[in-house]
Image (cartoon, grey):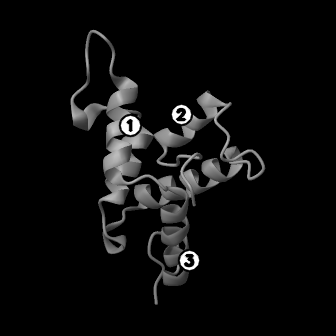
Amino acid sequence: MADIHGLSDHELDALWEEFHRVVNMTSHALSEWLRTRDASPVTEPLPEEAGSEAGRHVLAILQKRRRDLTDDDVRLMRKVVDVVGSLSDEEREPESADLSRRHRLMTLGHDPLKPS
């Protein structure tokens, strides 16, 4: 079968599963986090504009079916898997001391304090 998004069906299945393993926040929890993260005492962004572009894109992917993925989705999924892997420290999780690390991961849909 022809490659889709530069991946074989098997590779795309593996990436899909790995992405959904590392993105351990629900779409609702991620959406809420992105809105909370961007809120200030004076203003709050519209829900569809809250959070970073990457965070909104992760949220969009969570709401898709695998067969509806775009090349941009696949690129971001690879990036999220790589970033979460590089920022995750099995020995330190679930430790709350590094708040900025946790918040960066949560912006990509991974809460290191959430039980596996």
Q: Which residue is mark 2?
A: 103
Residue 14 on image: x %, y %: 55, 75
Name which of mark 2 and mark 3 comes first in the sequence: 3
Quick check: 13 left or right of 99? left
Q: Which residue is mark 1?
A: 33
**Amino acid bearing label 1:** Trp
**Amino acid bearing label 3:** Glu
Which residue is at 49% across, 45% downward?
A: 108
Tell me the CA gap for discs 3 and 1. Answer: 30 Å
**Amino acid bearing label 2:** His
For the residue labelled by badge 2, is the local secondary structure a helix, a strand or a loop? Answer: helix
In the displayed structure, 91 sits above or below 38; it is below
Regarding residue 83, the answer to whether it shows in the image is yes
Residue 21 on image: x %, y %: 53, 64
Regarding residue 6, the answer to whether it shows in the image is no
* Disc on res. 21: none
Tell me the CA gap for discs 2 and 3. Answer: 29 Å
Which residue is at 50% across, 57% downward?
A: 77
Please tell me how crowded label 2 is: few (under 14), some (14-19), or many (20+) other residues with Cα within 10 Å: some
Residue 63 on image: x %, y %: 29, 59
Name which of mark 2 and mark 1 comes first in the sequence: 1
Q: Which residue is mark 3?
A: 11
